Image: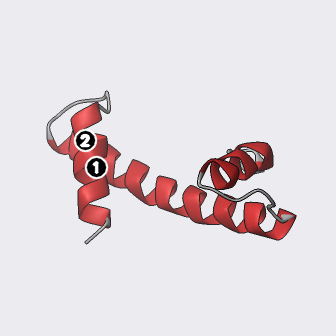
Amino acid sequence: MPELSLASMERLLRKAGNERVSKDASLELQAVLESIGDKVSKEAIRKAEQEGLKTVKRRHIRAAFKEIGK
């Protein structure tokens, strides 16, 4: 089951400037963002563990996002 709601995806697309948003567009954005989120989360956890931490911190998320975006 998806973690991000379709309503949230529709709001993001509308906020970006679209008045009309198809369900397919919302579903695709949902899939893309969940995939990116999964990759960033796994990398952030790895970075926290490398530091001997159990808690993932903001710096781990930011560093992971930068690394994933390469």
Residue 48 against residue 2 in the figure, above or below: above
Q: Position of residue 18 (x, y in %)?
A: 70, 59
Q: Secondary structure at mark 2?
A: helix
How many numbered discs? 2
Badge 1: how crowded within 10 Å, few (<14), some, or many (20+)?
some
Q: Amino acid at mark 2?
A: His
Find residue 8 and name its label: none
Above-or-below relation of 22 to 61: below
Q: Which residue is mark 1?
A: 46
- Residue drawn at point x = 17 percent, y = 34 percent: 52
x 32%, y 54%: residue: 43
- Dot 2 or dot 1: first in sequence order is 1
* Disc 1, SS: helix
Report the quarter where the C terminus lies: bottom left
Amino acid at the residue labelled 1: Arg
Q: Position of residue 8 (x, y in %)?
A: 71, 43
Asked whether 14 or 61 is in front, the reply is: 14
Q: Name the residue located 75 percent from the left edge and 68 percent from the top edge.
A: 25
Q: Position of residue 11 (x, y in %)?
A: 70, 45
Q: Residue at x 17, y 44 (%)?
A: 50
Q: Is residue 14 above or below residue 22?
A: above
Q: What separation in Å lies between label 2 and label 1 (alpha carbons)? A: 9 Å
| Side of 40 where 26 appears, left or right | right
Relative image position of residue 68 (x, y in whole percent) = 31, 65
Q: Is residue 8 left or right of residue 36?
A: right
Q: Along the horizontal axis of the image, is 51 left or right of 2? A: left
Q: Quadrant of residue 21?
A: bottom right
As rendered, which of 57 and 66 lies closer to the eye? 66
- Choose top left, top right, bottom left or bottom right for residue 27: bottom right
Q: Is residue 61 above or below residue 64?
A: above
Residue receiving disc 2: 60
